[in-house]
Image: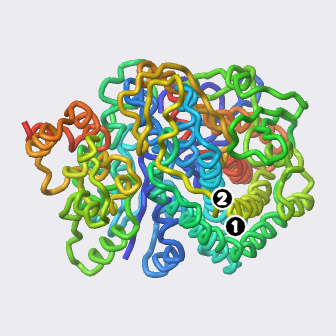
Amino acid sequence: MGGSSKGDVIVDTNELRFIEGHARLQVRMAGGDTVAEFQNLEGPRFLTKYLVGKPIEMAPMVASRICGLCYTAHSINAAEAIERALGIKVSKEVRELRNVLYLANNLRSHVMHLLYLTLPSIKGVISVLRLRDKDLYEAGTRLLTKSTELIEVWGGRSVHVPNVVVGGFGAVMNGRQLVSSVHELEGLMNDARKFADYAIELDLPELERYRPLGSLRNPGHYPTYAEDASMVLNDGSLLTSDEYYDSITEVTKYYSTSKHAYFRNSELTVGALSRVILNRRHLKPEAKAFAERVEWRMNPFLIIKAQAVEVVHYMEELIAAGQRLGDIMVEPSKEGAASGVNCSATQGEIPDCQGTGRGFFVAEAPRGALCHACEVENGKIKSYKVYTPTAVNSKSIELDAAEFVKKFRPLGVEKMRYILEDMTRAYDPCLSCAVSLDIY
Amino acid sequence: MRLAFYALTSCEGCLTTLITNLGPNVEVLWKMFDIDYFKLVREPVGGTRIPKADIAFVEGAVVTDRDRRTLTEIRKNSSFVVALGTCASSGNIAYAASRDVDFEAKHLRDLEISPAEPLSSLVAVDFELSGCPVSAEEFTEALLRLINSIEPIQPDFSVCYECKSKGNPCLLDAKKVCLGPLAMGGCGAACPTVGSACYSCRGPAMEADLKAYLLTLEKKGIGKEKALMMLRMFTGKKAKELLKDGR
C-alpha cells in the first residue's frame, strides 16, 4: 500500500485474523510520540455512490449489501431514512416487527463474533472447533442457527432480507406464524445463559482509558431500534439524534480505504460496552443479573462481556416480543401513502413517487450507533451517507493501541502484537461496513 | 482433501451464510476435510501465505491490488477454483457502481484501487456458485459432486419457474418490472415471494432471452428503461455480455 508513512514501526499486526473484512494495525514512533494507524485494507464497493440517482425503493436492498453480518440493520435504517425524507409514517405494528428483526440480527451478530472470532484466540486455540468446552460450541451453534432462522422467517431470506422495504414489509406479516418460532427461543435460554456465564468468567487484560462513550437512549427501554432516540454520553449530556449527526465530521486517512468519523473532532466509543455502561438499568432481569457480576470500566476488552450480557438481553426481549406478536397482522405496505406525500406504496414498491426531502435515522446496530442519511428529489435519491459504528470507533482503537504500547513496551513486540490484535477484535470492527464511508 | 475459503472485496455475507446456515454441519466439514484457510473459522495454516488446496472457494470482487495479488496466488496454489457468490462471479453492484469513478484521483491511486471486476477477468475460474448471498444447499451439493469427481451443475431454470411453482402472483402482470424471466433460479424465488421484484442477483439464466423479455414488457405496457437499469445492477459484467447479445 502506498502513502507516506513516517516514523519507526514498533508493532505491526499484519493482516488481522478473525475479523470481518481486511485490516491492519501499526503502532509507530513519530516525532517522539507513539501513534497508531488502524488501516482499512478492504476495497470500496461504491454502494452509497451507486444509490445516487436511483429510485428510492432500491435503498434498503442496496444498503443491505454493505455488510454480511448486520445487513438487517442497514436495510431497516435505509428504509427509515427514506421514509423520513418523504414524510411516510409507518404503523406501530411495522415498528414492532422491525424491532424484532433488529433484535434477531443483533443476537446473530454477537453470537457469531463471540463464538467464532473472539473466544478461540483468547483461549489460545486455532479455531472454535478446537475449544475444549464442546458444550459451549454446541450452545453457540444452536443460538446461531435459531437467530438465522428467525431472520429467514421474517426477512424472507437468511442474509440480505428482501422483506424489509420502504413503507413497511413486502409480504403479509401474520404475527401468529412467528409466535411458534419465538416460542422455541425459550428452550434456548439455557444456551444463552451458558454462553454469558462463560464470557463473564473470562480473564481479560487490563487496559483502562478514559474516553467519551455514546449510546442511544430510549426512555424506559434498553436501546436498540426505536422510533425516536436521543444520544446520551457518559458526561451526562443528551443530544438529539440530529445534534449527534451534526457533530460528526469525516476525516480522510492516507493509510486507509475508509474515512474515520470523528465526533466533535475527536473520539467517541460506541457499541455494546457503551450501551451497557450507560443503559444497564434498562436491561431485562436476567441480563441485568449477569451485568451485575462485572465491574464495568472503560476497558475495550470488556466489550466481549458486554456482548455476552446483551445476548441474554436480546433473547429476553425477543421472548417478550413474542407474547405481543400473536395479535399482529401487517398488510403489505400501503400505509406509506401518507397524507400530503405524492407516493403510494404497494407491495413494497413506490412507483412514480415525486416526493422530495431529507431524512436520516440512527439505531443501535450490533457494533454501535448506525446512521443512515439521504436526500431525495422527485422520488430519486440525490445523496446517501452512512456513518457506521466502526468508522466512529476507529479513532478509539488507535488511541487505545498507542496507549497500550506506551504502557507495556517492556512486554516485547511479539506479546504486544497478540494483545493488540485481541484488543482490536474486541471492538468487533467491520471493515466491509466502514468502507462505505469511502474516500472517492 | 484440502479446502480453502477466501474473501476478497465483499461483505463476507457468503462466508457467514455458509457458517450460519450449515449450522452443526460446519463441524462435519471440519472433520471431513483439511480446511487450511478460512479466516472466520480458523487461524490460517502458514500465516499470511496462501496454502495449497484442492478446492478454493473465493468470495468477493477484485478491487484492490491486494485482491489481485491474493487471487493470483490462490489460482497458483489451488487445483479447482470456485467463485462463491455474485461479487466473485459477476462483480455485483460494485461492477456497475465503479465504472464512472475517477480512479486517477490521487488517493485512489495511492491506495491501489481500480474498478471492480469478477474473478474471471483475472484468472481462470472452474465453477461459479452465484447468488447474493450464495445458497448453503447449493454449496453442499457442489462440494459433494466435486469430491466424487462429478462436475457440479448450475440451475438450468429461471426464477419464474420457482416463483410459479410457489403459486406467487406474477409481478409483471401487476405491471411491475421483475427480472424473473431472465434470472437464474435456485434461490426459491426469495424476493418475489415477499412481493419484491427479482433483480437477477444470480446472473442470467441459461435460457435468458433478452429480446423476448423486452417484447413481453412492451406487450404488458411496462417501460424497459428501469428493467435495463435493474439488469445492470447485480449482473455486473454478465449484464454487459447479455445486453450485447440481445441487441
Q: Residue at x 72, y 30 (%)?
A: A35
Q: In the image, A111: left or right of B18?
A: right
Q: Amino acid at mark 1?
A: Gly
* Distance Cα–Cα, label 2 vs label 1: 25 Å
Q: In the image, A225: left or right of A204?
A: left
Placement of A403 over or under A107, stated as above or below: above
Nearer to us in this view, B28 or B160: B160
For mark 2, give the secondary structure.
Answer: helix
Mark 2 near mark 1, Cβ–Cβ under 8 Å? Answer: no
Nearer to us in this view, A93 or A287: A93
* Residue matched to label 2: A107
Placement of B213 over or under A193, stated as above or below: above
- If the image is split into quadrants, where does the N terminus of chain B sit? bottom left
x then y, percent, for residue A208: 87, 44
| Sequence order check, earlier mark of 2 and 1 | 2
Q: Chain of mark 2?
A: A
- If the image is split into quadrants, where does the C terminus of chain B sit? top left
x then y, percent, for residue A399: 75, 34
Q: Amino acid at mark 2?
A: Leu
Picture quarter containing residue A45?
top left
Placement of A293 over or under B239, stated as above or below: below
Residue B241 visible in image: no
x then y, percent, for residue A170: 45, 49
Colour scheme of the rendered structure: rainbow
Picture quarter containing residue B227?
top left
Q: Residue at x 37, y 70 (%)?
A: B137
Q: Residue at x 69, y 80 (%)?
A: A135
* Residue matched to label 1: A124
